[in-house]
Every structure is written in C-alpha cells, then in structure tokens.
Image (spheres, rainbow, N blue to C red):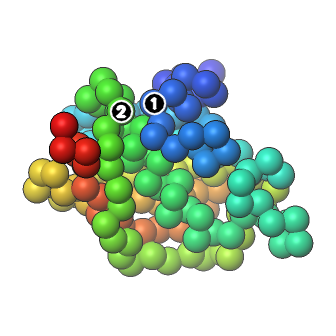
Amino acid sequence: MREILLEGDKLKEILPQKERMALLDRLISVDKEARTAESEVDICRNNLFFDCDLGGVPSWIGIEMIAQTVAASSAVMSAKTKAGMVLSVNNYSAKEPLFFEGDTLKIQVREDFVSEPIFRYEGTIYREEKELVRSKITVVQGDFNGQ
C-alpha cells in the first residue's frame, strides 16, 4: 500500500485556496533534496470546474492543479503556508482537452529555477502512465501585505 503524505481536511488546511477552489485530493510526496512533489486529483462532478455538458474538467485547469501542488509542497517544505502567486505560464501543452469524470490524475512538479522570491517549476499531469499536460509556471512567494 502506498503512503499518502496529506489528504482531505489536513491538505486543505495548508492550501491557500479554500472551499471548492482547493482542487487537490492528496499530496503523495515531497522531496526537499530533489525539489519535487507529487499530488493527486480525482475528477468528479463536485469539482468547481466540472462541466456537465462536456462530461469533465477542461485540461487547462491543470495549470491551477500544478500551482496548487507547488503551494502544498512549499508549505510542507517550509512548515508553513506561504503567500504566492503565479507570474507566468510557459510551454503549456495538452494532449487531451478534458479530464473525464472518474479520472485520477497524478500531478508532478519539479523546481528548475530559483532566484528568491521567484521560483519556476515544471509540472506534468498524468492519467495512469499517459502524459496529459505539461507546463512551466513561474511563481513569486512572499509577504504581499508588507508585514
């Protein structure tokens, strides 16, 4: 049986996104040394972005899933939730237009550039072993309230 680092309410506590905007179901792993993390999302009708007419969630929502995996792993690595925002999305590619009801998606992120407070991550989303989405996101992390 595989281990799950965080799930459910415990995961939602560390995500800056709240209520239905918190899209991740499980944080599977965080490797501080390798600067990688993995999470999972179960696609179901109660997903904020589920479109009944399409029968799924548009794959461009994967950008937010990647960003939330970054946020969750950052909170685990620093032992606190950090404020942050996405500055840019680059090299986005999707092999399918939708994530379908019943899909369990695996989101993997890898930090590939740091110049604090700027961080860039490569994110990949898989269904089973099939790559569905790949993108790079650049984020800024820090205190945006001047405190």
- Whether residue 37 is visible, yes or no, is no
Alpha carbons under labels 1 and 2: distance apart: 6 Å
Image location (x, y in percent) of residue 102: 81, 50
Which SS class for mark 1? helix
Give the mark, 1 or 2, whose residue is nearer the N terminus. 1
Q: Is residue 143 at all visible to an observer of this figure?
A: yes
Residue 101 versus residue 145 in the image, above or below = below
Image location of residue 59, percent across then percent down: 63, 69
Q: Are marks 1 and 2 in contact (CB under 8 Å)?
A: yes
Q: Residue furthest front?
A: 146
Q: Quadrant of residue 49?
A: bottom right
Query: Residue 77 is drawn in which quadrant?
Result: top left
At which x and y percent is residue 5? 49, 24
Give the residue type that dot 2 points to. Answer: Thr
Q: Toward the viewer: 33 or 136?
A: 136
Count of numbered badges drawn on the protein: 2
Residue type of the residue flagged with mark 1 = Ile
Residue, disc 1: 14
- Residue labelled with disc 2: 81
Q: Which one is nearer the viewer's eye here, 143 or 80?
A: 143
For the C terminus, the image quarter is: top left
For residue 96, side relative to residue 102 (left or right): left
Secondary element at image label 2 = loop
Residue pictured at 51% horizontal, 34% vertical? 27
